[in-house]
Image: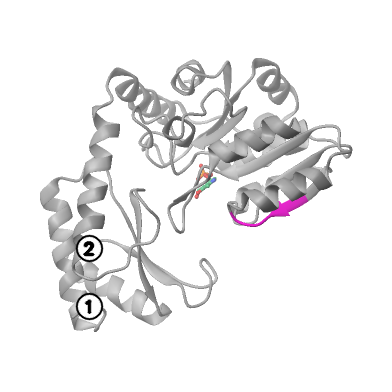
Amino acid sequence: MEQKLAEFHEREDCILYASCFDANAGLFEVLLSPEDAVLSDELNHASIIDGIRLCRAKRLRYKHMDLKDLESKLQESQSSRMRLIVTDGVFSMDGDVAPLRGICDLAEQYGAMVFIDECHATGFLGPRGRGTDELLGVMDRVHIVNSTLGKALGGAAGGYTVGPKPLIDLLRQRSRPYLFSNALPPPVVGSAISAVEMLLASNEIAQSMTAKTMRFRNKMTQVGFTIAGTSHPICPVMLGDARLASVMADDMLKLGIYVIGFSYPVVPKGKARIRVQISAAHTEEDIDRCVDAFIQTGRKHGVIS
Ligand SMILES: Cc1ncc(COP(=O)(O)O)c(C=O)c1O
């Protein structure tokens, strides 16, 4: 599994954890000391925030996807021994994609390293589904990738780090969730290996995602819904009001469509939404049926006319 994931991401080596939460909890403490600095996007996933809390490096939070602010934090931390820029490749609540090219440019200019969390990109983003770094053409400029087997790779559990061999060797010796917790169950590993093999064998699945995603986004926008993000298969149907998001999701379920309403504190107040996730298993008919159900419930609740 580890060899296949390293091959898939085109990195030297890989270490497998029971979850990506563990991979994020186990990395920063091993890699960074008090003389180092970590520069983290303010909207990074909770597991990254917790992982960073466990390390003793200087912490600097930059404004969400704001390269100017990142640069000012890089200038502020010039005296640190090693600097690590940390970002989600894709931010799951809005489906927005980190500006990785600009981040890598700044990292090279200031001698920093780049880490990305690819839970919402591995398996489907980029022409071969390798992730955000492939999509933006920076696979050879991002140093460390953490991701999950529990989303697009379908296994419901498992996470990993891929990167330079010496780092992975060090994690095997020192990373606490790896050392002090059970390994991933073999049946989960078996199914995840099959998923990765399917992706290594053909780009068809990854490429079909783009067409399906655009079908959903375009149809929904045409009838008057607002979908956040750009081209990501996470399609947040923005509704604003928390109760509206919840009752509309209930009505969608009555029509046979399982979608989830999200509201505060998971997303900011006034930004409640129903988050729709397009899957490679969906057919065009499935997508059209989902759009029809949204039209019906959206009209019922006065969201569209
Ligand atoms: C960006 C991100 N990182 C890490 C995780 C944790 O992944 P896992 O479920 O494998 O622990 C998630 C899961 O929601 C996530 O969205």
Q: Does residue 183 lie above or below 299 as drawn?
A: above
State the mark number for residue 304: 1
Looking at the rendered structure, the secondary structure element under dot 1 is loop
The residue at 50%/15% (across/down) is 3
Q: Is residue 92 above or below residue 156?
A: below
Mark 2 neighbour density, 10 Å: few (under 14) some (14–19) many (20 or more): many
Q: CA distance from mark 2 to mark 1?
A: 10 Å
Which numbered disc flags the more N-terminal residue, 2 or 1?
2
Label 1 Cα crowd, 10 Å radius (few <14 / some 14-19 / many 20+):
some
Task: Using the rendered view, name the quadrant where residue 239 is placed.
Answer: bottom left
| Residue type pointed to by label 2 | Met
Query: Which region of the structure is painted magenta?
Result: 60-64
In the image: residue 205, left or right of residue 114: left
Give x and y (percent) for residue 133.
49, 32
Residue position marked by numbered label 2 in the rendering: 220
Q: Is residue 303 magenta?
A: no
Q: Is residue 285 above or below residue 34?
A: below
Is label 2 in a helix, a strand or a loop?
A: helix
Magenta: predominant secondary structure element? strand
Q: Nearer the viewer, residue 282 or 114?
A: 114
